[in-house]
Amino acid sequence: MRVRIGIVLASLVLLGLAGFRVQAAEPVKLVVSFPGPRNISYLPLDLAPRIGADKAEGAAMVSLSSGGGAVALGNLLNRNADFAVAGLPAAMSQRANGGKVVAVAPVNDAPLFVLMVRSDLKGKIKGIADLKGRTIGVNTSSLTSKTTSQQLVELLLLSQGVKPDQVRIVPAGQSWRDQSTLLEDKLADAIMGDEPFASRLKAEGKVFFLANLADPATARGIPGANFLHATLETRDDMIARHPEEVARMVRIVRRTLVWMARHSPDEIVDALGVTDAEERRSLLYSLKTYPDLYSKDGRFSTRQLAETERFFRTASGSDLRLEEMVIDTWAGRKP
């Protein structure tokens, strides 16, 4: 009898320990806000949970899509998210306005923006200067953060003698549906757009390209044109109170970037589970056209950070030093 009781007690202890192990192994929930869905610059964030990069790091990543980098940063600072992925110039705008945001890992290795114009205006708008008096859509800004796309538009306008207050800026969102609707309803004459949406709209005959940052002719006229765009950001208090979660999220991003560097565009789109034929075509086109878009290892580049600071200072007139808000503890840095 005593033996049986001992066996029962031992079994209960083992079950209790097993339950403890299950509880201890519960994945850490990490909420990440970023533009999209399936915006090419932010595609690694769509992909991370699909390939199990979060699970491999003992986390469950929750995606919170937004209409622009400034909105994603707002979600971060309002504590709706633990992390944001937004253009680094947009994060710098937020920091310059008092937002306690820091950059902890790069996602992109090249900025990718296309200034596209409605096709019915092809004979009327032939250059940047012709946008004077027109309505231009940009990724949605906020009161405390001007999106990277708006900063870029203003620099392009100024380079051709057009002041920013000589055009009307409207939010264009950051999805194919948002940008397509804005153009179809003629609520904007032009959009500083994103891939793969820009190429898809062009293929559908709805727009023509006026300027493309991937074109050296466009880049030459922009100070700091090779700025760091999509970047993983968090808050100062996350660094201070939850450094292990920051380290985990950086590893998820880096794991995803390394996976993408080792797989073909077709394999990437397959992993995303894209079923719409047109969306698949446009994603494949962009991934094949811009093979150097993403960071290969998720490390900061000192050269690119200098380019980013130059771009932001020219666009904003701010004297913010980027080193004040870049924490490379977990991502590392290269020349």
Image (cartoon, grey):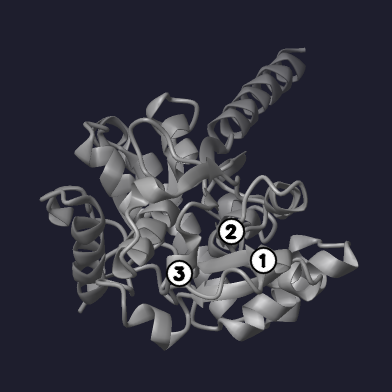
| Rendered image quadrant of residue 66 | top right
Q: Secondary structure at mark 3?
A: helix
Measuring from the top left, give residue 266's x and y in whole percent: 75, 79
Residue at the image point whose x is 40% and y is 54% from the top: 148
| 288 to the left or right of 254 | right
In the image, which disc is placed on residue 190?
2
| Rendered image quadrant of residue 334 | bottom left
Measuring from the top left, give residue 261's x and y in whole percent: 54, 79
Residue at the image point whose x is 61% and y is 84% from the top: 289
Q: Is residue 168 above or below residue 257?
A: above
Cα–Cα span, label 3 and label 1: 13 Å
Q: Secondary structure at mark 2?
A: strand
Most foreground residue, 53 or 62: 62
The answer to whether one can see residue 247 in this image is no
First-in-chain label (1 vs 2) = 1
Badge 1 vs badge 2, beta-carbon distance below 8 Å:
yes
Cα–Cα span, label 1 and label 2: 9 Å
First-in-chain label (3 vs 2) = 3
First-in-chain label (3 vs 1) = 1
Q: Secondary structure at mark 1?
A: helix
| Residue at the spot of label 1 | 121
Tell me if mark 1 has few (under 14), some (14-19) or many (20+) residues whose alpha carbon lies within 10 angstroms of its own: few
